[in-house]
Image (spheres, helix red, strand yellow):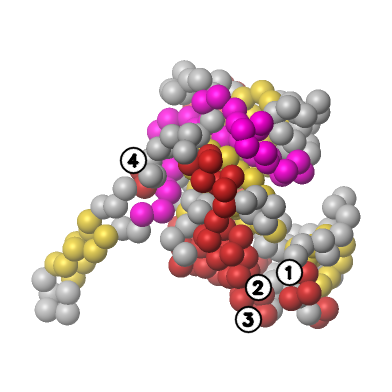
Amino acid sequence: TLPPESTSTVTPVASPTGQPMPTATPDWWRPSPDQPIAFHWQLSQEFVYPRDVIPHVTVYDIDGELTSAATVASLHALGPDIIVICYFDAGVYEDYRSDAAAFPPAVIGNPDEGWPGSYWLDIRQIEILRPIMENRIKTWCKDKGFDAIEPDETEVWSNNSGFPITKVQNNAYNRMIAELGHKYGLSVGLKGNTTETGELVDAFDWTLNEQCWEFDECSFIYDSFVQQGKAAFNIEYDATPDCTQAKQWRLNSAQRDLNLVGPTHPEYSFAPCVPYSQTDWE
């Protein structure tokens, strides 16, 4: 069951005869900034149920390939408001993924510095990458019962990818990924691409940002997603979020450990601007 903001609404549209015809808004998750959302993001350590369940958390963002359908079902069984997000990398090739052989050498570029086994993709070659990403969205996410997708590493144009990718081409690739997610009835989050949020907000349902306080970029998120009634999540690693401003702007901000481990790991660190037990911004 999806939360109230995901329920279907009827919008009149003109028929060929000029008379309005009702059309249903798709039922995927559309979180709003009206209330804070308790969000847990866990990537470098495999999510284990029930070990990594956190009280009051309603949104879990975990690795799509490594998470089983049984784990997703167990999380959903915790309550009707639970949302499970399927994480996967959409802008890099990873030599350790099960579908690594599907990527031809021509689309694999420079190393993604700091992440061993990860290389930037030539996202201009959409016709090659589309079926690979669609297969991930279907088999890793939709078929396992996830509610949403978080396609990561999609800000390729501003990195040293080895390819002359433009912002326009990068935006086109992001829109293609969003269309694929929606094709399978999944909510889609824009990961990063902070300075492009105003250009992409219409294609995405929510956004997840890293380090906007550290780089003084949070206003981009507020001016786009929040102002259009779409939820925004922010994680800081080195900087401390400006929690007073975050609450005023209705950004779900928190400080976390860089590796995004589980809550029982000794390196786990978590300091949200709004406690997860709290249901309002103040």
Cα distance between the residues tagged 1 and 3: 17 Å
Q: How dense is the environment of label 3, judged by Cα within 10 Å: few (below 14), some, or many (20 and up)? A: few
* Cα distance between the residues tagged 1 and 4: 36 Å
Q: Tell me the residue that label 1 is attached to.
A: 99
The reply to whether the magenta stretch includes residue 170 is: no
Q: Position of residue 215 (x, y in %)?
A: 72, 39
Query: In this image, 174 relative to 158: left or right?
Result: left
Amino acid type of disc 4?
A: Pro
Q: Amino acid at mark 2?
A: Ile
The answer to whether the residues at label 4 and label 2 have Cβ atoms under 8 Å apart is no
Q: Position of residue 264 (x, y in %)?
A: 73, 27
Numbered tag placed on residue 230 in the rendering: none
For residue 127, the mark is 3
Secondary structure of the residue carrying tag 4 is helix
Q: Which residue is mark 4?
A: 4
Part of the protein shown in magenta: 27-56
For marks 1 and 3 on the same chain, the one whose residue lies earlier in the sequence: 1
Pointer 3 or 2: first along the chain: 3
Q: Which residue is mark 2?
A: 132
Quarter of the rendering occupied by the N terminus: top left
